[in-house]
């Protein structure tokens, strides 16, 4: 299975008739977000049909426009386009379905253009360090003077206030501070760290939800508002059980590997091949019976430890038993048999495995976008699918924008200035 | 906070099925002011009501603190959806709702999904299932462990230094229910977007949310590198050259070093020991070439230090160093209390606990949680009377076990 499957095997746009306008069509977002968490949030809003105009500048490029060796362009490079800033795959993944205007916000005229754009928009988003928008003269009060109905959201590591508001907002730091890191792993001395971007995407989805709440509020009474999103707090999503246990049982839960309080076996088991594993979780006694049957554990038809309380008491023994039966099996083949028997199971998938799985191909979890320089490339799809009945299905996919690709659209169409003015703004270093 | 009304005041939600994503989505809708009716099988959802930890002094099916957290504040009704009469009750509840959130349960006489939208144009319906509504694996059973495996998280956990401590060990799942809850949030997003569109004059919608899709599509730079650069990251290779997780005198810390500024700040935090002053470590590339010895040096320093001391020093010097905090430590952290993220809540039998409160901090739109009774069918009478049933009907249905 070639990893570059999208370019070789899946040419052409999504099937005809599937694209719509999205439920947020007509909403315009002025997006000052950069790097990771913020762009994931506005990407979801773009998937819902909002027009997302990314405000950026070559003077201080988005970190995802830098850092790795860029892809080689396969299409002609227009004059003045900086390939180094335009061909980073991660930047393409995070900013697909968006537009880009290049504004130098440290120039007074640049700041005024931004405020003029805010006046004809619905939402402003940023994920700078706490307090940055105020320092740039773009705090909520200034934005509201430009547009009294504006919904403004700032997303930062630990929020705009509180004793730790200046904590560095790197995902691994936030995972440590949120309690998540202390709960991954096993035993008193072995802690795991999780994928660094985990907290970013959780924060992003919560932040997107809060913007929708604000938009619904604005529908009701025509007023905007200010939203303060803390990425740290997003790290707590899903950890409620641990927080309640710490208070109700009197002892704080520690790292617990893959175990569960109420399910056993419940682990990733080694299969045949290099770094091949299968996740199996037995949630009911019936599933245990089925697992025993499939793995040949039920000698003479007698299922050992039929009750979950007994299984939990003999967890190590059962894990060894299951492991001894899975290690010679193929993870995909065993998954098929177990799923057919009603047991939750799946191979531990790498990205390569995700590309290859027919289910995710069928559901278009990865889609194709046509980038102006690198051509067809794979990007992540939307995390939800809307029916096509009311034109709320996702709008057509478009690739991440070149820096400043929408300068003319913003200056001439949205702000109504003429082309001579556009040329002057570029020459004066206001649009750059 | 002002006196602006909740955004979902007057919105009727019907919630059916699930122990994680669907109830979490329902809880968020309830916090935003919606009137949520939750349907359980007669006697209550046995799996969901047994989730630990437990509230003291409560009967068996009402002692799950997780069930309480997710569901107190909804109107809890029971109905045996597999029977024609029970299915009809659920169908009637669905028909009078603005929003239906479910995990694709079997309901006698009621076809969910696109069919429901065809028959009732104004209903916003969201199905949150492990593998989604369509595709070869639609309907296959799953769990949070499996979602972690499918979504790519397990394949890369633990990574870097933590992986090197025990390279033979199995991939690890993340803690808690993050897998389902992210899908619950995606469902909320879909429902709110649909309601926004409906407020603009359009009809309802059917939204298909798959837990696995959410996790795969929310991730991750790995996708792009694998697809475009033929680079497949593993637990072994996914590491910053310098930094990661280090054991210290009273727990663990996480250190992030990328730029020269990060490195300078970390050196200052460590008291600039002679080994760290080597010119060999002056640039990102040279640090990568010497990463093992640098990490060993950091580990040696960290081992004798306490988390809070290191964190304070790092903050003064601008280094990116964070202590691993446990839930018990976070609960007493003033930052969370100041931000009202954790709010003290009265649980049954007088227990008080800090629980995660509002989902977002918004200047104008309140989100509140008002717990109510959680006995199975606690709201049967109120809801079914409202549906037009008489007291006698309700009693009869109870006796035959339909509700």
Image: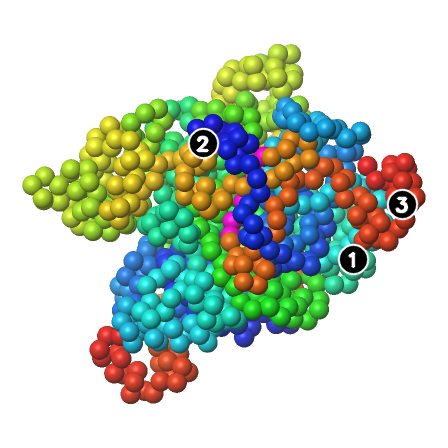
| Foreground: disc 1 or disc 3 | 3
Judging by the rendered image, the residue that carries numbered circle 2 is A352
Image point 46% across, 76% down: which residue?
B96
Q: Residues within 10 Å of mark 2 (few under 14, many from 20)?
A: many
* Chain of the residue on which disc 3 is drawn: A
Disc 1: which residue: A120
To which chain does the residue with label 1 belong?
A: A
**Which range is magenta?**
A377-384
- Tell me which numbered mark, 1 or 3, is placed earlier along the sequence: 1
Identify the residue at horizontal 45%, vertical 62% (top origin): B114
Q: Residue at x 25, y 31 (%)?
A: A329
Q: Please identify the residue farthest to the left as the structure is shown.
A: A300
Rounded to the nearest angstrom, the CA distance separating label 1 from label 3 is: 19 Å
- Badge 3, how many Cα within 10 Å: few under 14, some, many 20+? few
Q: Secondary structure at mark 2?
A: helix
Q: Nearer the viewer, residue A120 or B265?
A: A120
Mark 3 and mark 2, same subunit? yes
Mark 2 or mark 1: whose residue is earlier in sequence: 1
Which residue is denoted by mark 3 in the rendering? Answer: A419
């Amino acid at each position: 299975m070639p990893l570059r499957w999208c370019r070789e095997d899946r040419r052409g746009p999504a099937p005809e008739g599937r694209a719509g306008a999205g439920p947020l069509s007509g909403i315009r977002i002025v997006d000052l977000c950069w790097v990771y968490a913020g762009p994931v949030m506005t990407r979801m809003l773009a998937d819902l049909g909002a027009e997302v105009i990314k405000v950026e500048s070559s003077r201080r490029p988005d970190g995802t426009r830098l850092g790795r060796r860029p892809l080689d362009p396969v299409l002609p490079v227009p004059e003045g386009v900086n390939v180094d800033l335009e061909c980073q795959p991660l930047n393409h993944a995070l900013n697909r379905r968006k537009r880009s205007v290049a504004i130098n916000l440290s120039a007074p005229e640049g700041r005024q253009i931004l405020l003029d754009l805010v006046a004809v928009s619905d939402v402003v988003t940023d994920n700078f360090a706490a307090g940055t928008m105020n320092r740039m003269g773009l705090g909520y009060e200034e934005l509201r003077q430009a547009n009294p109905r504006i919904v403004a959201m700032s997303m930062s590591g630990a929020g705009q206030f509180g004793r730790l508001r200046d904590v560095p907002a790197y995902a691994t730091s936030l995972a440590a501070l949120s309690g998540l890191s202390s709960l991954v792993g096993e035993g008193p001395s072995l802690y795991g760290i999780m994928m660094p971007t985990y907290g970013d995407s959780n924060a992003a989805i919560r932040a997107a939800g809060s913007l929708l709440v604000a938009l619904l509020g604005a529908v009701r009474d025509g007023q905007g508002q200010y939203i303060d999103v803390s990425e740290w707090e997003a790290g707590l999503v899903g950890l409620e059980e641990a927080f309640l246990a710490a208070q109700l049982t009197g002892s704080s839960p520690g790292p617990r590997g893959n175990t569960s309080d109420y399910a056993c076996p419940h682990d990733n088991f080694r299969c045949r091949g290099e770094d091949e594993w299968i996740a199996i979780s037995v949630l009911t006694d019936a599933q245990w019976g089925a697992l025993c049957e499939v793995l040949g554990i039920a000698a003479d038809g007698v299922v050992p430890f039929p009750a979950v309380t007994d299984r939990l008491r003999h967890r190590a023994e059962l894990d060894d038993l299951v492991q001894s039966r899975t290690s010679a099996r193929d993870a995909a083949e065993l998954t098929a048999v177990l799923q057919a028997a009603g047991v939750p199971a799946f191979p531990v998938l790498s990205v390569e495995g995700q590309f290859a799985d027919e289910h995710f191909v069928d559901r278009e979890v990865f889609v194709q976008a046509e980038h102006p320089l690198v051509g067809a490339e794979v990007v992540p799809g939307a995390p939800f699918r809307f029916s096509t009945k009311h034109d709320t299905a996702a709008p057509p996919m478009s690739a991440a924008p070149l820096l400043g690709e929408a300068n003319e659209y913003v200056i001439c169409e949205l702000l109504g200035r003429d082309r001579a003015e556009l040329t002057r703004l570029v020459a004066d270093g206001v649009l750059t | 906070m002002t006196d602006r009304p909740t955004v979902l005041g007057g919105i009727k939600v019907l919630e059916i099925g699930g122990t994680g994503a669907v109830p979490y989505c329902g809880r968020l809708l309830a916090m935003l002011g919606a009137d949520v009716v939750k349907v359980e099988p007669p006697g209550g959802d046995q799996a969901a009501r047994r989730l630990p930890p437990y509230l003291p002094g409560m009967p068996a099916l009402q002692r799950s603190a997780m069930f309480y957290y997710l569901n107190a504040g909804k109107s809890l009704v029971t109905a045996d959806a597999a029977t024609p009469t029970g299915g009809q009750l659920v169908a009637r509840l669905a028909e009078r709702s603005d929003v239906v959130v479910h995990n694709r349960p079997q309901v006698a006489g009621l076809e969910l999904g696109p069919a429901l939208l065809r028959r009732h144009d104004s209903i916003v319906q969201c199905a949150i299932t492990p593998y989604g509504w369509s595709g070869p694996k639609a309907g296959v059973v799953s769990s949070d462990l499996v979602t972690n495996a499918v979504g790519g998280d397990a394949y890369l956990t633990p990574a870097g230094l933590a992986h090197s401590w025990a390279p033979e060990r199995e991939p690890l799942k993340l803690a808690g229910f993050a897998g389902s809850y992210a899908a619950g949030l995606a469902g909320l997003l879909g429902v709110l977007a649909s309601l926004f569109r409906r407020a603009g004059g359009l009809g309802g919608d059917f939204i298909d949310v798959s837990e696995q899709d959410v996790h795969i599509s929310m991730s991750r730079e790995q996708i792009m590198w694998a697809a475009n650069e033929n680079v497949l990251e593993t637990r072994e290779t996914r590491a910053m050259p310098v930094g990661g997780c280090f054991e210290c005198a009273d727990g663990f810390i996480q250190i992030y070093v990328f730029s020269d500024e990060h490195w300078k700040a970390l050196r200052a935090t460590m008291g600039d020991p002679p080994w760290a002053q080597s010119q060999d470590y002056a640039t990102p590339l040279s640090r990568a070439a010497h990463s093992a010895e640098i990490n060993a040096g950091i580990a040696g320093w960290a081992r004798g230090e306490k988390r809070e001391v290191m964190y304070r020093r790092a903050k003064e010097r601008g280094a990116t160093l964070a202590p691993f905090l446990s839930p018990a430590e976070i609960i007493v952290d003033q930052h969370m209390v100041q931000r009202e993220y954790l709010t003290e809540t009265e649980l049954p039998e007088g227990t008080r606990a800090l629980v995660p409160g509002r989902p977002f901090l918004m200047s104008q739109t309140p989100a509140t949680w008002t717990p109510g009774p959680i006995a199975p069918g606690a709201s049967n009478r109120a809801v079914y009377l409202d549906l037009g049933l008489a007291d006698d009907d309700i009693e009869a249905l109870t006796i035959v076990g339909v509700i």
